[in-house]
C-alpha cells in the first residue's frame, strides 16, 4: 500500500515518540524535518551505512528513526513516496510494470540522482520547451516591502486598464510570511470598494491553512463542544457564527445570549451550562463511544456537525463550497489513519483533526484572474506579458544555507545537496532568476531599502544582469492619497447639545479622565451610553484584583484607625490582621488561594511602608460624595484621607496598575482623579499621592510638603508649592468639565489614548488619520 504524506508523517511521529533516548520536545516539527531528511537520502541515493551518520547525536538519532520507519513499513507492507521511484524502476526492469510510451518533463530546474535513474529506465523521455523570452529587466529601489507591494499593485492596475486581457505576474519570494499584507494591499488598490463583487482581478497562488477559513473554523469550533470544558470566548464565537443552525433567523437572540455570557465573566463553561444559553447551542447529539478508530471518528464528526446545522442556512459562495469539499477531503485523510493509529479518545481525535486542518494548505480555485501573485516555485513553466519580481535583496537572492539538521553536513556538502552551502544557494538563485526573467518580455525587479530599522542591500544578481535603474515615479496608490488629491468639502460637526448648568453626570472621576483622553470618547460613553463588550479573562480579572485591594485596605483601616495602632501590632498580629481582611475581601474563585497569598504579601509590604510615615489618623476611607466642577456635578469616592497631628491632610488613591510620574501635568492630565479630590477637599494639604500595590512595585508616588510619606517617589509638577499646584488643577479640571458640559465631541485623542480604547470602530479615528497615528508615541 502506498502511504499518503499524512500517513508517512504519522508513522514517523510514532517512531520518534516511541524512541527511548531521542525524544524531542516538538515531535511534530521533528518528524517533518526527519521525513525531509529521509526523502533527501533516497532522492540523492545516500547510503545509510555511511559511518558519518554515527558521528553526531542528531544524525545518529535519525539513523535509528529511519531504520525503525523502514522496519515498520516492511511489517505493514507499506510503500512511502521517497522509495516509490526505486520501486517503479524495479518493476519496469522485472517486467511487473509496463512503461508508458512517452514521458514529457516540464518545470525541472534540476534532476536528482533518483529521478535520473527512473528516467533512464523509461524508453522515451523528452523535455517540454521552457519559456525563453529575451527581456531586459529594469530595477527599482523602494523604501520598504509595503511600498513595493503598493507600487506593484498600482503597476498591475495600470496595465489592466490599458489591456484587460494582459497576463500579469507578481513574484513575492517570502509570500508565506507576508500573504495577509499582500492581499490587503492588492485588494485596496485593485478592488477599492468595501466589498469585492464578481470576479477578482488578482489571485494569490499561496493558500491559507484550511483551519483559517471561517466555515472550517466554525466546524472545528462546533466539535469542541464535545470537550469537558469550553472557553467562554469560543462559546461566544459559536453563538455569533453564521455557519451554525438558523443564524439568519435568530442572530439577534444569539447576540443577546452572547452579551449575557460576557457579563457572567466566566473563563470556561461545561457543556451543560453552554446548552442553556440558547437553543442553537443545544443540538440533538447521539452518545459517542469513549474510544474508536479514526474512520469511525470521521463519521461521528460529520454526524455531530449535521446536528449543529453546519454549514448554516445561508446561500454558500463558491469559495465556501470549495472549502467544504476540502474539509470533506481532510476528514477522509484523517480516516485513512486507521491503518496507522489505534483507538483514540474524542479529545485525541479532535486534536489530530485540528492539527491536520492547520497543516493542510488550501486555496480556492483560480477562475482566470489576470494578475497572478505567487512565490518563486509556483512560477515554474508559466509565461506572462509583464512580470514584477519583488524582494530582490541579498538576503533572498541568494538565501543563507539551510542544511538539513539530521544529515551529516560533510555528506550534504560532498553531494552538493540543496541548501547545503553558500555556493549552492548562489547557483540556485542565479538559475531561478534566469528562469523567471525568461518567462516574460517586460520584467521589473524591485528591492526594499529597509526592513523596519534594518537596512537592506540589493541582490548582486541585479548588477550581474545589468538591469537599468528607474525611479519609482508612480502616483500614491493608497486610497487615502486619492482622497487627499481630490477636492473635498470639509464640514465641522464636533459639538452636541450642551448639558444644563450643574447637571449631574454619571461616570464619576472616570468621566474627567475620559474627557482628558479624548472628548469624543467621553461623549460616546456618557452621552450616547456606548459600552464596550465584556471580555472574560483567565484567572482573577484585573478589576476584581483592584476591588479586593480596596476592600481589604478599607477593612484593615476600619479596624486600626490610626498610625499608632498600626505600629503597636506585633509581626504575627499584623499577618493575622491582613489574612482575615484579605479573606473577607475576596470573592469565591478557583484561584482564590493563590490570590489570597499574593495579596497578603503585597499588603504586608505596603503596611511596612505605612510604618515609616509621620503619625496620622485615618479620617475617611472609600467615602462617596458629590462635587461640582465646571458646572458639572459628579460623584467621587476618595480611597483614603489621613489627618496628620498638625491638622494637614494626606490624600491617598490606591493603584493596582503601573504608575507613571507625569500623569498630573499639562492641560490634559492622564489621571485626574486625585487632582479632583485635592481641589474639593476641605482643609490644608500636606500630600497627595498614589499608593501603588502591585507585584514588583509597592510604594508612594506623589507630591508632599516635607517628608510626611517617608520616602515617596516624586510626581512631576508645574508649580513650586502644593497649594499652587492645587489651584492649577482646579482651573484645568473646570475647563475639562466645561468642555464636556458644553457639548464638545471632537475626535481628538491624547497621545497613547487610542492604545486601549474600545471605541475606535465608532469614532473611526484611523480612517481619517494622516501618516502619523494618534498613539505613535507608544
Image (cartoon, rainbow, N blue to C red):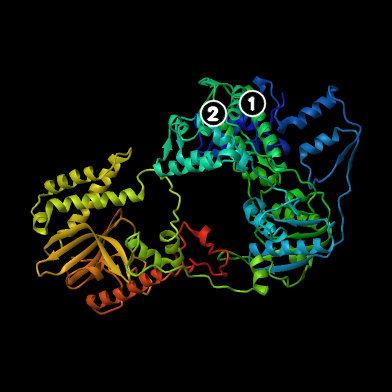
Q: Is residue 220 above or below residue 367?
A: above
At x 14% / y 65%, what residue is drawn? 643
Q: Nearer the viewer, residue 653 or 747?
A: 747
> Which label sits on residue 283?
2
Q: Is residue 64 above or below residue 768?
A: above
Q: What residue did someone put label 1 on?
A: 335
**Which residue ends up furthest to the front in the rendered image?**
500
Tell me, yes or no, if residue 540 can be seen here: yes
- Element on which disc 1 rests: helix
The x and y percentages for residue 23 are 50, 34
At x 75% / y 30%, what residue is drawn? 84
Image quadrant in which you'd find residue 104: top right
Q: Nearer the viewer, residue 488 or 767?
A: 488
Are there few (<14), some (14-19), or many (20+) residues within 10 Å of tag 2?
some
Q: Nearer the viewer, residue 637 or 613?
A: 637
Tell me, yes or no, if residue 33 can be seen here: no
Q: Would you say the residues marked 1 and 2 are in contact, meaning their CB atoms lie under 8 Å apart?
A: no
Q: Nearer the viewer, residue 399 or 288?
A: 288
The x and y percentages for residue 498 are 42, 69
The residues bearing labels 1 and 2 have C-alpha atoms spaced at a distance of 24 Å
Q: Is residue 62 above or below residue 596?
A: above
At x 20% / y 52%, what residue is drawn? 554
> Which label sits on residue 125?
none
Amino acid at each position: 500500500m502506498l502511504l499518503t504524506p499524512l500517513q508517512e508523517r504519522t508513522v514517523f511521529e510514532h517512531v520518534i515518540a516511541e524512541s527511548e533516548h531521542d525524544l524531542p520536545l516538538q515531535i511534530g516539527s521533528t518528524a517533518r524535518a526527519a521525513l525531509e531528511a529521509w526523502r533527501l537520502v533516497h532522492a540523492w541515493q545516500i547510503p545509510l551505512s555511511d559511518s558519518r551518520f554515527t558521528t553526531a547525536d542528531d544524525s545518529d538519532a535519525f539513523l535509528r528513526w529511519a531504520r525503525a520507519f523502514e522496519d515498520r513499513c516492511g511489517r505493514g507492507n507499506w510503500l512511502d513516496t521517497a522509495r516509490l521511484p526505486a520501486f517503479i524502476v524495479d518493476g519496469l526492469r522485472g517486467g511487473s510494470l509496463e512503461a508508458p510510451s512517452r514521458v514529457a518533463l516540464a518545470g525541472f530546474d534540476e534532476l536528482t540522482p533518483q529521478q535520473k535513474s527512473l528516467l533512464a529506465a523509461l524508453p522515451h523521455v523528452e523535455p517540454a520547451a521552457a519559456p525563453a523570452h529575451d527581456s531586459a529587466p529594469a530595477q527599482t529601489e523602494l523604501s520598504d516591502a509595503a511600498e513595493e507591494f503598493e507600487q506593484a499593485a498600482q503597476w498591475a492596475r495600470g496595465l489592466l486598464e490599458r489591456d484587460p486581457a494582459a497576463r500579469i505576474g507578481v513574484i513575492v519570494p517570502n509570500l508565506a510570511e507576508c500573504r495577509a499584507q499582500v492581499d490587503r494591499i492588492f485588494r485596496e488598490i485593485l478592488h477599492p470598494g468595501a466589498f469585492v463583487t464578481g470576479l477578482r482581478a488578482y489571485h494569490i497562488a499561496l493558500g491559507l491553512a484550511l483551519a483559517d477559513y471561517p466555515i472550517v473554523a466554525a466546524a472545528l469550533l462546533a466539535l469542541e463542544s464535545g470537550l469537558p470544558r469550553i472557553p467562554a470566548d469560543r462559546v461566544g464565537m459559536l453563538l455569533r457564527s453564521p455557519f451554525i443552525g438558523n443564524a439568519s433567523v435568530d442572530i439577534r437572540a444569539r447576540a443577546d445570549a452572547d452579551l449575557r455570557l460576557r457579563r457572567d465573566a466566566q473563563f470556561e463553561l461545561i457543556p451543560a451550562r453552554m446548552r442553556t444559553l440558547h437553543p442553537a447551542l443545544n443540538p440533538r447529539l447521539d452518545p459517542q463511544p469513549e474510544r474508536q478508530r479514526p474512520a469511525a471518528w470521521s463519521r461521528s464528526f460529520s454526524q455531530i456537525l449535521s446536528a449543529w446545522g453546519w454549514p448554516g442556512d445561508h446561500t454558500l459562495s463558491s469559495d465556501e463550497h470549495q472549502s467544504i469539499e476540502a474539509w470533506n477531503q481532510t476528514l477522509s485523510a484523517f480516516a485513512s489513519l486507521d491503518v496507522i493509529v489505534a483507538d483514540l479518545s474524542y479529545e485525541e481525535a479532535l486534536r489530530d483533526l485540528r492539527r491536520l486542518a492547520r497543516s493542510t494548505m488550501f486555496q480556492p480555485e483560480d477562475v482566470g484572474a489576470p494578475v497572478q501573485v505567487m512565490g518563486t516555485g509556483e512560477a515554474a513553466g508559466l509565461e506572462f506579458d509583464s512580470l514584477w519580481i519583488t524582494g530582490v535583496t541579498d538576503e533572498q537572492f541568494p538565501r543563507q544555507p539551510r542544511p538539513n539538521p539530521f544529515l551529516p553536513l560533510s555528506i550534504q556538502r560532498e553531494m552538493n545537496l540543496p541548501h547545503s552551502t553558500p555556493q549552492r544557494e548562489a547557483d540556485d538563485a542565479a538559475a531561478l532568476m534566469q528562469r523567471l526573467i525568461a518567462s516574460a518580455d517586460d520584467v521589473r525587479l524591485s528591492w526594499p531599502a529597509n526592513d523596519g530599522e534594518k537596512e537592506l542591500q540589493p541582490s548582486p544578481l541585479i548588477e550581474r544582469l545589468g538591469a537599468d535603474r528607474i525611479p519609482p515615479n508612480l502616483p500614491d496608490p493608497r486610497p487615502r492619497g486619492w482622497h487627499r488629491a481630490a477636492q473635498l468639502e470639509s464640514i465641522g460637526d464636533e459639538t452636541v447639545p450642551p448639558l444644563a448648568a450643574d447637571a449631574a453626570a454619571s461616570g464619576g472621576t472616570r468621566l474627567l479622565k475620559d474627557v482628558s483622553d479624548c472628548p469624543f470618547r467621553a461623549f460616546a460613553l456618557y452621552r450616547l451610553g456606548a459600552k464596550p463588550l465584556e471580555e472574560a479573562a483567565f484567572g482573577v480579572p484585573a478589576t476584581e484584583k483592584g476591588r479586593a485591594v480596596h476592600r481589604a485596605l478599607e477593612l484593615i483601616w476600619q479596624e486600626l484607625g490610626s498610625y499608632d495602632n498600626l505600629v503597636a501590632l506585633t509581626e504575627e498580629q499584623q499577618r493575622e490582621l491582613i489574612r482575615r481582611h484579605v479573606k473577607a475581601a475576596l470573592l469565591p474563585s478557583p484561584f482564590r488561594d493563590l490570590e489570597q497569598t499574593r495579596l497578603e504579601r503585597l499588603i504586608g509590604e505596603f503596611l511596612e511602608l505605612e510604618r515609616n510615615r509621620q503619625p496620622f489618623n485615618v479620617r475617611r476611607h472609600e467615602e462617596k460624595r458629590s462635587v461640582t466642577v465646571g458646572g458639572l456635578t459628579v460623584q467621587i469616592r476618595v480611597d483614603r484621607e489621613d489627618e496628620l497631628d498638625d491638622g494637614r491632610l494626606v490624600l491617598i488613591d490606591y493603584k493596582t496598575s503601573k504608575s507613571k510620574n507625569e500623569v498630573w501635568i499639562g492641560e490634559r492630565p492622564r489621571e485626574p482623579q486625585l487632582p479632583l479630590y485635592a481641589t474639593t477637599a476641605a482643609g490644608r494639604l500636606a500630600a497627595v499621592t498614589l499608593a501603588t500595590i502591585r507585584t514588583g512595585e509597592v510604594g508612594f508616588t506623589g507630591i508632599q510638603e516635607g517628608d510626611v510619606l517617608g520616602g515617596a517617589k516624586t510626581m512631576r509638577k508645574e508649580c513650586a508649592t502644593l497649594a499652587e499646584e492645587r489651584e492649577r488643577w482646579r482651573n484645568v479640571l473646570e475647563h475639562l468639565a466645561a468642555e464636556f458640559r458644553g457639548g464638545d465631541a471632537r475626535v481628538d485623542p491624547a497621545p497613547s489614548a487610542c492604545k486601549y480604547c474600545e471605541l475606535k470602530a465608532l469614532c473611526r479615528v484611523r480612517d481619517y488619520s494622516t501618516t502619523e497615528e494618534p498613539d505613535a508615541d507608544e
